[in-house]
Image: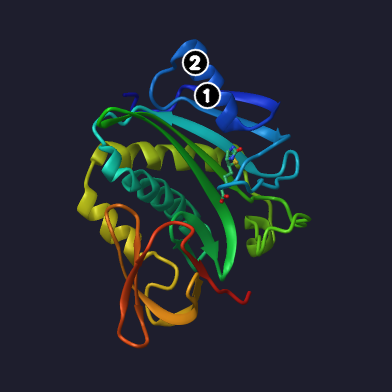
Amino acid sequence: MKKNLKNMLFVRETISTNALMKDIHCKDKPDEGFVVYTDYQSAGRGLGTNSWEAKAGKNVLFSILLYPHHIKPSEQFVISQIVSIAIWEVLSEIISNVKIKWPNDIYVNNKKIAGILIENTIQGNCISKTIIGIGLNVNQTKFESDAPNPVSLKLVTGKSHNRLSLITKICNKIVFLYQLVNYDLLKENYFNNLFRNNGFFPYHSDSGSFNAKIIDVKEDGRISLLKENGEVKLFGFKEVEFVINP
Ligand code: BTN
């Protein structure tokens, strides 16, 4: 495992840095910590079937490769926690009100500034590799897709930011937290910086709309919500929607 990030590849354009990382991994099996970053993705991917909008040359778009053999598939949510906390820490050095929106979006004042796409390969009872793709809105000021509530560092601070320096800082934090392997600290840090970690807010699920309070995020990534009627319910990814009025 490299302690510093010497291993970075820049390509001016690619389909998606996660897809490119997959190809590179197949051919070259790079060392853990290898990073690919780009100015433009022709088909940047978000979670599920979503796409990821990012104007050329304006944003942070990269993927980092890890071989987390020591993390069991049942504990894979810890990777989301590591990456969310890393981005949270880097952004919080620049702006205030940064929050981690469950499961792993990064928000500022009710708006999304960064998204994370983690693709794990599971072999037997271990995660043989993970490709972590990060899209952070940096110097883009107009968003045209129907992404619900985007914001960028420039929109928040009024000035431009150096993209490579952000990538380096985020990767160094990821590698640091990854090597620390302190699950309790990660859980606490994640919850402390979670969007809506205090009080009742509106949510929507298959069973309709309701107000609830987040009381926990379990090791498997499910969120535990306390409804106003006292009922506690666990929701997996995509099973509950945050109702947000930006
Ligand atoms: C989300 O939907 O919130 C996840 C967005 C992840 C976007 C990043 S940009 C770099 C990497 N390559 C991709 O195609 N997607 C991720």
Q: Residue at x 55, y 50 (%)?
A: 115
Categorize mark 1 by other alpha carbons within 10 Å: few (<14), some (14-19), many (20+).
Answer: some
What residue type is disc 2 on? Cys
**Residue 22 placement, left or right of 122:** right
Residue 19 higher or lower than 212, as above or below: above
Residue at x 57%, y 74% (from the top left corner): 244
Three-letter amino acid code of the residue under disc 1:
Lys
User: Circles 1 and 2: CB distance less than 8 Å?
Assistant: yes
Horizontal and vertical percent position of residue 210: 47, 81
List x then y, in percent, for residue 172. 41, 37
Calculate the distance from the C-alpha at mark 1 to the C-alpha at mark 2. Answer: 6 Å
Question: Ligand 1 lies in which image quarter?
Answer: top right
Name the residue nearer the viewer: 45 or 40: 45
View extreme (top): residue: 27
Q: Kindly identify which residue carries mark 2.
A: 26
**Mark 2 residue crowding within 10 angstroms, few (<14) / some (14–19) / many (20+):** few
Residue receiving disc 1: 22
Instruction: Give the farthest residue toward the bottom.
Output: 229
Label 2 element class: helix
